[in-house]
């Protein structure tokens, strides 16, 4: 999906005080994976949501908290720029 859509490979740099977008040919991407008990899920969710570095695409992250073998929480965070 990221390879197919330029917007998911786009970053932003400041040039003369203005944000300028650029598109990379390839970006590294991995799903963050966690194992937790149900009472720990809130802690993992709070740690998952953090600031993006606009000059380092992709400007999205995906995570999976495995609570039990067939029960988990899928996390998705994307910058709004």
Image: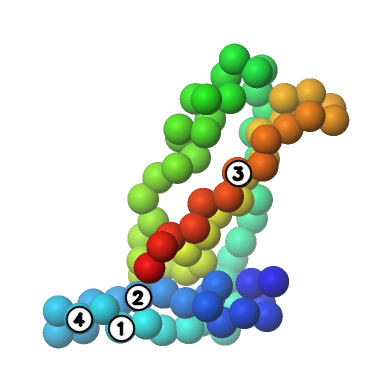
Q: Quadrant of the N terminus?
A: bottom right
Disc 1, SS = strand
The single residue placed furthest to the left in the displayed view is: 16
> How far separated are the C-alphas under marks 4 and 3?
31 Å
Which of the marked residues, 1 or 3, is nearer the chain's N terminus?
A: 1
For label 4, count other residues whose C-alpha is less than 10 Å away and answer few (under 14), some (14-19) or many (20+).
few
The single residue placed furthest to the front in the displayed view is: 80
In the rendered image, the vertical position of residue 66 relative to residue 39, given as above or below: below
Q: Position of residue 4 (x, y in %)?
A: 68, 80
Which of the marked residues, 4 or 2, is nearer the chain's N terminus?
A: 2
Residue 66 image-quadrant placement? top right
Which of the marked residues, 4 or 3, is nearer the chain's N terminus?
A: 4
Q: Residue 5 bears which disc, if any?
A: none
Residue of label 2: 12
For label 3, count other residues whose C-alpha is less than 10 Å away and answer few (under 14), some (14-19) or many (20+).
some
Disc 4, SS = strand
> How far separated are the C-alphas under marks 4 and 1?
6 Å
Residue of label 4: 18
> How far separated are the C-alphas under marks 2 and 3?
24 Å
> How far separated are the C-alphas under marks 1 and 3?
29 Å
- The answer to whether mark 4 and mark 1 are in CB contact below 8 A is yes
Which of the marked residues, 2 or 3, is nearer the chain's N terminus?
A: 2
> How far separated are the C-alphas under marks 4 and 2?
10 Å
Q: Position of residue 12 (x, y in %)?
A: 35, 75
For label 1, count other residues whose C-alpha is less than 10 Å away and answer few (under 14), some (14-19) or many (20+).
few
What residue is at 41 percent from the left and 62 percent from the top? 80
Q: Position of residue 24 (x, y in %)?
A: 51, 81
For label 2, count other residues whose C-alpha is less than 10 Å away and answer few (under 14), some (14-19) or many (20+).
some
From the viewer's perspective, is 65 left or right of 7? Answer: right
């Amino acid at each position: 999906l990221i390879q197919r859509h330029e917007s998911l490979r786009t970053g932003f740099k400041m040039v003369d005080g203005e944000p300028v977008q650029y598109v990379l040919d390839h970006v590294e991407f991995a799903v963050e994976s966690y194992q937790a008990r149900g009472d720990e899920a809130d802690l993992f969710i709070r740690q998952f949501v953090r600031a993006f570095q606009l000059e380092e695409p992709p400007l999205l992250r995906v995570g999976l908290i495995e609570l039990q073998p067939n029960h988990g929480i899928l996390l998705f965070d994307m910058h709004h720029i």
